[in-house]
Image (spheres, rainbow, N blue to C red):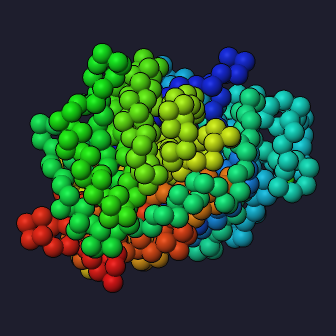
Amino acid sequence: MKYIILSLLGLAGSGFAGENIHQASEARCWLKVPSNQPPLKDVRISLGSVTNASWVKDPAIRDRQSDIMFPVRWWSWNEAVVEFTPTYDGPLELVLCGPWQADKDGAIFRQEILWDEISATGVTIQNGGFETQETQRPAAWTSSGAAYPAPDAWPLKGTKPLAGTHLATTWHNRTLSQTLQVKAGKPVSLRLHAKSATPPDFIAPKALGNATPAHRALARMKRGVNFGNGWEANPAWKIAFTTEDIDHIADQGFDHIRVPVGFHFYLKEGKDGMELSKSFLDELEPVLRRALDRKLTVLLDWHHFNDLTTAPDQNLARFIAGWECIARRFKSWPPGLYFELLNEPHDAMTTEVCNRIYPKTITAIRRIDPTRIIVASPGSWGGINELEKLRLPDNDDRIIVTVHCYEPFYFTHQGAGWVGFQGLKGVVYPGPPATPLQVPESLKGNPGVCQFIESYNTLPADRNPSSAKSVRLMLDAVQAWSLEYGRPVHLGEFGAHNIGDDASRGRYLHDVKTLAEERKIPWTLWEWKSSFGYWDPKTNRPRFRKAFFE
Ligand SMILES: [Ca+2]
């Protein structure tokens, strides 16, 4: 569970010849309408997102610039289809660019996007396959910003086009643009193909097949629930979990639990290294024992270790020593107990930093417990787009990967104070609503919320932002990545806050559960008996049995 929205700052770099090169997880392009023409309305994309240029202050310019993002992989081309119908005759600029991310000093990461086979109906695109080159640059396109790279330089050297013998490459500080001529009332469909360039020092991960010990471990889990607001919360206000909760969970038909623990609250220096507090173990262990006795698989997760996510290298020794202590304590426990290294890495704990820190931690655990199943999450809060960058030890096939998904976020987190959405209420699932929702006064300055509400009020269910569309696309990406690398993936958190109405929440939960199961992805609901909860502790009855089990 996260408590603030994605931070774009504070990411660490992987250096190459002094440049801040990173691998992109999303491609980006813009559509720019001239100031004397009406903005484009209802720009749709098959995969990804379309918003207005939220960073532009002047609304007259902002509303005339569509900001289009879609996920990319390094190992295959992704296709995105963008559709709209202009209401004027005249020019429209298409700009191929790249995602914006910077380090804490403001240096923008060079995340190169490779493009090929850009075609359209309803408008003419010239040299969309980039086959015609003039002075070592794609003809018919205008290159802006930094100098276009030579064919024998990174990232063009050795890259394989989708078709023909040439492709194009862009990033935030070096764009390619072309002016298209559109006609009022004539629908336009743009077909884009993109992938991410891999950094020069990139080594491809080994593909492990589909029958590893991790796959067998994953197969023990299908339906699960998180113990939220318990041992991961500040001990001053945490709620208690008991063996009675375990019995209810098992009786409902769940087959696993995820137990978030703020181990940093309970670890201290003892005479033989780190020790776990006895009173904490006296609370925790009977509950875990009961779960295993009731044939529930248990994921024990280190949650909210903010010292580590703020300053990874300064806290690495503490993290490793903590895991060694946990591994020693549970060494003799049954194999149905799994260790999840770190919940929702974020902030300075980027996926690239995880790639460096996880192997050291895994090695330390393996010295004590060689066969324990370990669960590992990518950065950006267990972000699905981050899977492309995740690197795990090629020689360890006992690792399950976990991701989190709270899409559609404005529905699941309406009313949630910790993300600033106190004022957002009454979002139903799926949209559109019978009566349009008004933008709450407190959120009028939030362009993301304003754009969400406009689309939510007007778009049909299959394209509405409060729908299963984004979840389906994300879980498709999870499944594709998992099959490519032979790493089994688990959906460790999803859920909806109780400010949303229960009927909508039930429909959302049922959709996510169904989409995950169709893709053989085990799911773990956030959470058991608090504000996202499955169980109503006042009545001792389930709230969402129908969504999951009927
Ligand atoms: Ca080509």
Identified at 17% across, 36% down, the residue is 279
State the residue in front, 100 or 277.
Answer: 277
Position of 7 with respect to 249 (left or right) is right
**In the image, farthest residue toward the left:** 538
In this rendering, would 395 be left or right of 297?
Answer: right
Choose top left, top right, bottom left or bottom right for residue 534.
bottom left
Q: Is residue 282 above or below residue 319?
A: below
Q: Is residue 216 left or right of residue 434?
A: right
Q: Position of residue 461 (x, y in %)?
A: 42, 77
Q: Quadrant of residue 238?
A: top left
Percent of width and height locating residue 142 = 74, 41
The answer to whether residue 245 shows anywhere in this view is yes
Seen in the picture, residue 100 relative to 469 is either above or below; the reply is above
Depth check: 490 or 35 in front?
490
Q: Position of residue 545 (x, y in %)?
A: 27, 77
Task: Locate residue 9 relative to residue 446 in the image: left or right.
Answer: right
The part of the image, by quadrant, that contains residue 265 is top left
| Residue closest to the far front | 332
Q: Residue at x 82, y 47 (%)?
A: 167
Q: Which x, y percent locates residue 488?
A: 58, 56
Q: Quadrant of the C terminus?
A: bottom left
Residue at the far bottom in the pictured view? 550
Residue at 33% x, 61% y is: 293
Q: Is residue 240 above or below residue 7?
A: below
Q: Is residue 287 above or below residue 262?
A: below
Residue positioned 12% across, 41% down in the render: 237
Q: Is residue 403 visible?
A: no
